[in-house]
Amino acid sequence: MGNKAYGQEWFTVDTTLPLVTIESPTNETYSTDIIMISLSGNADYIWYYINNIDTKNRTWSVDTSPIYYVLDNGTYTLHAYGNDSAGNKVHVSITFTVEAFTDNFPPKISLLIPENYSVLTSGFEIKLNVTDINLDTVLYNWDKTQNSSLISSNTVILPDDEGHHTLYIFANDSFGHWTNNVFIFITDDIEPRITLLEYQNMSVLPLGTLITLELNDSHLDRVVYNWDGCQNVTWISFETLIPEGDGQHVLYVYANDTAGNWVSTQFVFFTYEKETTEISSEQTSNQQELSSVESESLTDVSEDTHGITPLGELNIGLVLGTLFGSIGLILITRRLVRHRSSSSK
């Protein structure tokens, strides 16, 4: 018949690959174990997985929010795929490493200043050191009272009340590890007490007299003394002899305790030669003995006299008579002289 027909049809073949981008993670080492997964692209369908973590593909869409994985330390590869309606398929991947710090330890609490069991004055600043890379909270209290938060300076103030005080410290980190510590301090605001024993201040004493003092303080540290402002001497026995030289001597005493409380005092003594006193006493004793002997001799003579005046009494009478007679004669003579002088006038 020879009839023929011709025609043509035009169509386009799509060979352009869709776009899939891994925004996070990147090719690096992470110091945290929390890894964010974020994808983007223009593919009609996107899916992904992390090698050795995911057991099946996970779907991603443009409306998907970032997803977070908690991973152990190690190296991982994230695979992402996408395709379009023409069947074009794309694959991208990224390898990253996790080297996160694993905190298996509680915070550490230590005392910087002063040492534990120190004796201190009230108001002393106690400095602590609380360390943990993930430190969260630090609390403290004195003597089991209400807890207070410890500020960043880690400084607490010693209470005013005299005696022992116990400091309780508590700390935790962001992983929930708790720890505590206890420190003991002693508040001492009382100065040492210096007391003069046996003698009183301003006493008059022989040279070489032993002076004894008493020092009272529960935490006595050091005592020094000197006589008359000379060089200080460390004192242990609290006894000292008054130095040589008549007159005034001043004893200076200084004392402190381990809390730093200082006290000073002075005692004044007046001295004399002890030997002079002994000689005078001996002379007095000899005179008393001599008088006693004379008295005994007079008494012996007066015994058994049968009315005769004792010799001792007679001698005394003669002496007294002579004495008074002489005085009378002198008085009479003076009167006669005065009388004659008046007559001649």
Image (cartoon, grey):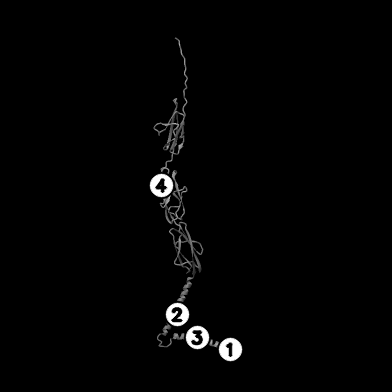
User: Residue 135: percent from the left, percent from the top?
Assistant: 44, 44
At a point 53% along the width and 86% down the height, the residue shown is 331
Q: Earlier in the sequence, mark 4 or mark 2?
A: 4
The amino acid sitting under disc 3 is Phe
Residues packed near mark 4 inside 10 Å, few (<14), some (14 to 19) or many (20 plus): some
Q: Does residue 295 appear anywhere in the picture?
A: yes
Q: Earlier in the sequence, mark 4 or mark 1?
A: 4
Looking at the rendered image, the disc whose residue lies closer to the viewer, 1 or 3, is 1
Q: Which residue is mark 1?
A: 342
Q: CA distance from mark 4 to mark 1?
A: 127 Å
Image height check: is 227 above or below 125?
Answer: below
Q: Which residue is mark 3?
A: 324
Looking at the rendered image, the disc whose residue lies closer to the viewer, 4 or 1, is 1
Q: Residue furthest top?
A: 1
Please state, as top left, top right, bottom left or bottom right, where the N terminus lies in the image.
top left
Q: CA distance from mark 4 to mark 3?
A: 111 Å
Q: Earlier in the sequence, mark 1 or mark 2?
A: 2
User: Residue 291: which numbered mark, if any?
Assistant: 2
